[in-house]
């Protein structure tokens, strides 16, 4: 299969390496000249995946039109802030019915659109899917067993993408719930920031477990209100992705939250991480969605106060714990 990756960060590069080893004809595109030069010179993403070599069969390019001209599948692997601009730039070169799968996670701040919705808005002629789940690039790039889910409008497209990606170390499930998969992937980054804050404050397992459990409750409330399916949030792109992002040192969202919990400002944390921290980009949009759909999301509200209103992390945590008494699941009857 001819597969083109638009975006050569850690995740795009890791998946490109994997698909090349799946014997697909892989093209890896980047708009960043220094990144292209590094990948061509060293056949390695020295900044993001040091020590992991790109197979010689991967074609590296900065020519957007040529990169997608003959692609049977296009993978959007640019970071969420660049999805719209990349989609807008590539749209004139996309044929009707072109299969595209987005693997980034986020919500656009000003429009409150998911990334699939952005791509569909800019490239209406395409057939757009999403791939998500508990999957760190650092582990996928070296063949660690990983399981994800693909969401598509039709089962035919989902199976097509499943067949492209699946191998004996990368298991792919399929689902019709694009909305639920996208919401799980985007909002878990916001909850992971809070998990990092907890670790930075010095709290331990009980606190982390409580945060993850109540975090998936908040994600589920919003996702279902927006049309997602409740089952999705107990699956790979819901609780699965939330667990891995809240507990791993690979997670830039967790690590940024940890620095904030240690007393650094949002700006200082982002500078130290030196990568796109998707949770910070999605935090305001998630809170706006909660207000739009009248959904209670106290953890998301608290992390916004820490990030953008200067509230101390320990104060925010105490306020969460001291909210009015309530039932865990109010819909359950006695």
Image (cartoon, helix red, strand yellow):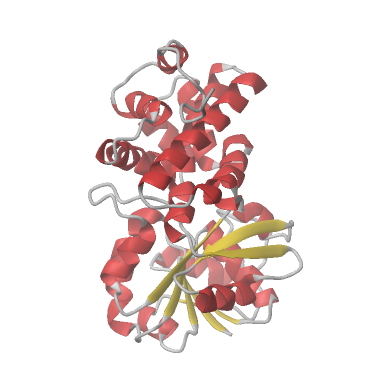
| The C terminus sits in image quarter | top right
Is 324 drawn above or below residue 53 in the view shown?
A: above
Farthest residue, direction left: 110
Residue 207 point in image, percent of width and height: 59, 20
Q: Residue at x 39, y 84 (%)?
A: 97
Is 250 drawn above or below residue 145 in the view shown?
A: above
Quarter of the rendering containing residue 78: bottom left
Quarter of the rendering containing residue 6: bottom left
Residue 13 point in image, percent of width and height: 56, 65
Whether residue 190 is visible, yes or no, is no
Farthest residue, direction front: 334
Q: Is residue 141 left or right of residue 325?
A: right
Farthest residue, direction bottom: 70
Q: Residue at x 36, y 30 (%)?
A: 296
| The N terminus sits in image quarter | bottom right
Number of marks present in the image shown: 0
- Depth check: give the residue in front, 34 or 331: 331
Quarter of the rendering containing residue 127: bottom left
Residue 230 point in image, percent of width and height: 50, 47
Residue 109 point in image, percent of width and height: 28, 47
Q: Residue at x 42, y 41 (%)?
A: 279
Q: Residue at x 68, y 81 (%)?
A: 23
Q: Is residue 168 left or right of residue 276?
A: right
Whether residue 148 is visible, yes or no, is yes
């Amino acid at each position: 299969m001819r597969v083109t990756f638009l975006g050569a960060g850690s995740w795009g590069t890791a998946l490109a390496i994997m698909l090349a080893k799946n014997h697909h004809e892989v093209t890896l595109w980047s708009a960043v000249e220094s990144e292209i030069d590094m990948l061509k010179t060293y056949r390695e993403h020295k900044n993001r995946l040091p020590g992991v070599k790109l197979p010689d069969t991967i074609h590296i390019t900065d020519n957007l039109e040529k990169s997608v001209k003959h692609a049977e599948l296009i993978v959007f692997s640019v970071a969420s802030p660049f999805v719209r601009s990349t989609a807008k730039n590539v749209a004139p070169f996309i044929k009707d019915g072109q299969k595209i799968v987005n693997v980034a996670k986020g919500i656009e701040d000003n429009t409150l659109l998911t990334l699939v919705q952005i791509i569909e808005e800019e490239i209406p002629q395409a057939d757009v899917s999403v791939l998500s789940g508990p999957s760190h690039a650092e582990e996928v790039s070296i063949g660690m067993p990983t399981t994800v889910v693909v969401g598509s409008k039709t089962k035919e497209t989902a199976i097509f993408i499943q067949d492209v990606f699946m191998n004996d170390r990368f298991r792919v499930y399929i689902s019709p719930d694009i909305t639920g998969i996208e919401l799980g992937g985007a909002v878990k980054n916001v909850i992971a920031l809070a998990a990092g804050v907890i670790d930075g404050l010095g709290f331990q397992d009980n606190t982390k477990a409580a945060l993850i459990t109540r975090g998936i409750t908040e994600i589920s409330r919003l996702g279902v209100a927006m049309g997602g399916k409740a089952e999705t949030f107990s699956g790979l792109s819901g609780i699965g992705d939330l667990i891995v992002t809240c507990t791993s040192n690979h997670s830039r969202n967790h690590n940024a939250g940890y620095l904030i919990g240690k007393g650094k400002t949002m700006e200082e944390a982002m500078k130290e991480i030196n990568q796109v921290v998707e949770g910070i980009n999605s935090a305001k949009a998630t809170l706006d969605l909660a207000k739009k759909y009248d959904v209670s999301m106290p953890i998301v509200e608290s992390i916004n106060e820490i990030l953008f209103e200067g509230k101390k992390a320990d104060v925010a945590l105490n306020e969460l714990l001291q909210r009015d008494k309530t039932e865990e699941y109010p819909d359950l009857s006695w």
